[in-house]
Image (cartoon, rainbow, N blue to C red):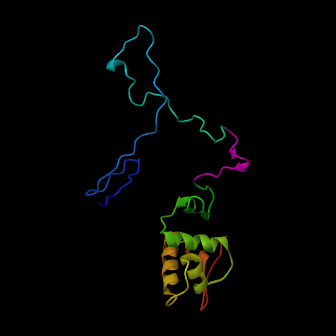
Amino acid sequence: MVGYLVLVPAEGGAAPTGFPVASIPAPAQAPVPAPAAGGPTGPSSAVPFGSGPSVVGQPVAGVPASGGFAGGAPVRPVRPAGRGITVDVERRNAYVDGRLLDLTYLEFELLAHLTEHPQRVHTRDHLVSAVWGYGHVGDGRTVDVHVARLRRKLGVAYRDSIVTVRRVGYKYTPVA
């Protein structure tokens, strides 16, 4: 038997039709205190949904309450505030001027590899083995097509940061 699990964003996104949707239970709440002696009992005394203990603004286990450091290392913001191309390999996100890019797996890997080695010229064969993970089979058009798609997603201001080195390959040059 084959089943599908569709995850829907909590920001009011609708589930696609035709697919069964799994609901994910909310995290366990702290136990609700018993009513005071002499207070009302029974179903009418139940705490309304959402009026229980709030976790917003509460310290989380393993995360410092203040200071912005966890274990001596600075905690990085989820979205970078600066300008330019930012690649967060840990979260597998890429940003242009703080805007999250919608990249495929190989586009992200290609951008991460190029930005990790700025100004270095990469041959198409090297990119295929480093990004795709296997020896080069066929022509270099696979790399060319992925670079073209990546440039399109980077936008007008940053598409020229991936420079074509004729008859060799590509290099990443940060935009000043």
In this view, the residue in front, 106 or 164, is: 106
Q: Residue at x 47, y 27 (%)?
A: 31
Q: Residue at x 60, y 75 (%)?
A: 161
Q: Left or right? Give the position of 36 relative to 6.
A: right
Q: Left or right? Give the position of 155 relative to 176.
A: left
- The percent position of residue 36, horizontal first and vertical second, equals 45, 12
* Above/below status of 97 relative to 119: above
Give the image quarter of residue 59.
top right
User: For the view shown, which residue lies furthest in the front direction?
Assistant: 1
Q: Left or right? Give the position of 74 relative to 32.
A: right
**What secondary structure is the magenta-colored segment mainly?**
loop
User: For the view shown, which residue lies furthest in the bottom direction?
Assistant: 167
Q: Which residues are magenta?
A: 66-78
- The percent position of residue 47, horizontal first and vertical second, equals 40, 24
In this view, the residue in front, 130 or 167, is: 130
Quadrant for the C terminus, please.
bottom right
- The percent position of residue 1, horizontal first and vertical second, equals 29, 60
Q: Residue at x 41, y 51 (%)?
A: 9
Magenta stretch: includes residue 76: yes
Asked if one can make out residue 71 in the rendered structure from this viewpoint, the answer is: yes
Q: Residue at x 68, y 74 (%)?
A: 118
